[in-house]
């Protein structure tokens, strides 16, 4: 399904124009949103995720009119915000089982199956009995991905997920994203050029709330 964003604008109360007429069409696969701090990436991500409203513009995902039917989008959305999650002192397996229940997976067998799957995909199976509160930053980020995969989202938004990760953790995290991007639409925001180089076929470069470049990362080598 295609995500289409048209003429999106947002000016904050302090007068900062965070989105200044954003137009984007995003196809399934891994899409990189690259821009420096303050470019407007988080504002755009939160707006797509229906956590805040723009001043003007439209967003559609397939036949969902996102701004008119935010609940419909939320049912097919997996969103990993920029802030690290704070987790209770529970094992990853128990916590995922609990989240799966909250997401409406009521059969114990179904929960067991999906929890096993998402732990495998995120490469956390070996540490599933450890407390998530004791996880490293990278493991927490991968746990965040495991959590959002529970209800098989069609659109996945990850906001600056590699910020603050050391090189080994970053690589492990990118590997997980690479794996899930083969059958999902993933929008990945970052200020790290190499993240986009390694992972994304398509990208947009944003700054000052505007799209400065849109195209393949191959063709965009000069822009990068
Ligand atoms: P990025 O994610 O690329 O760093 P943001 O969307 O967080 O960019 O921010 C874009 C601009 O909007 C920045 O100048 C930022 O300071 C400003 N901004 C973000 N959130 C708010 C807010 N809640 N109130 C006022 N200004 C904000
Ligand atoms: P940090 O960068 O904070 O050391 P890492 O995620 O690199 O965090 O690793 C923390 C510890 O957990 C390391 O000993 C690492 O080998 C181990 N570890 C990390 N991920 C996994 C995993 N998926 N399975 C088993 N052990 C892991």
Image (spheres, rainbow, N blue to C red):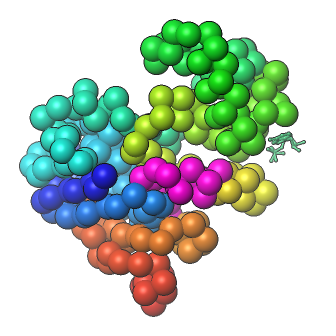
Q: Position of residue 82 (x, y in %)?
A: 50, 43
Answer whether residue 183 is magenta in the image: yes
Image quadrant in which you'd find residue 179? bottom right
Front residue (pair 152, 126): 152
Q: Is residue 187 above or below residue 35?
A: above
Q: Is residue 113 above or below residue 175?
A: above
Q: Position of residue 142 (x, y in %)?
A: 65, 41
Q: Position of residue 31 (x, y in %)?
A: 43, 62
Q: Check the image and name the residue furthest to the left.
A: 56
Front residue (pair 141, 36): 141
Q: Which residue appears at 48% of the width and 84% of the height?
A: 218
Q: Which residue appears at 21% of the width and 56% of the height?
A: 5
Q: Which residue appears at 48% of the width and 72% of the height?
A: 201
Image-based side of 194 in relation to 89, left or right: left
Q: Is residue 44 above or below residue 99?
A: below
Q: Which residue appears at 53% of the width and 57% of the height?
A: 182
Front residue (pair 135, 96): 96
Front residue (pair 187, 164): 187
Span highlighted in magenta in the image? 176-191
Image-based side of 192 in relation to 112, left or right: left
Does residue 14 appear in this view? Answer: no
Q: Position of residue 64 (x, y in %)?
A: 19, 41
Answer whether residue 208 is magenta in the image: no
Q: Is residue 83 above or below residue 168?
A: above
Does residue 115 appear in this view? Answer: yes
């Amino acid at each position: 399904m295609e995500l289409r964003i048209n003429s999106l604008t947002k000016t904050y109360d302090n007068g900062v124009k965070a989105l200044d007429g954003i137009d984007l069409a995003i196809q399934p696969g891994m899409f990189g949103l690259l821009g420096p701090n303050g470019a407007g990436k988080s504002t755009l991500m939160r707006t797509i995720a229906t956590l805040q409203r723009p001043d003007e513009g439209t967003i559609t995902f397939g036949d969902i009119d996102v701004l008119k039917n935010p609940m419909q989008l939320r049912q097919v959305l997996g969103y990993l915000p920029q802030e690290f999650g704070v987790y209770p002192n529970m094992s990853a397996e128990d916590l995922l089982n609990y989240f799966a229940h909250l997401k409406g997976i009521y059969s114990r067998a179904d929960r067991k199956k999906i929890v096993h799957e998402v732990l495998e995909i995120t490469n956390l199976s070996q540490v599933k009995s450890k407390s998530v509160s004791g996880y490293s930053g990278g493991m927490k980020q991968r746990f965040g991905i495991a959590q959002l995969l529970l209800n098989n989202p069609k659109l996945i938004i990850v906001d600056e997920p590699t910020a603050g990760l050391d090189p080994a953790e970053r690589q492990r995290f990118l590997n997980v994203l690479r794996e899930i991007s083969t059958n999902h639409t993933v929008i990945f925001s970052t200020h790290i050029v190499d993240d986009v180089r390694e992972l994304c076929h398509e990208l947009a470069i944003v700054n000052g709330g505007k799209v400065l470049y849109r195209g393949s990362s191959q063709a965009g080598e000069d822009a990068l």
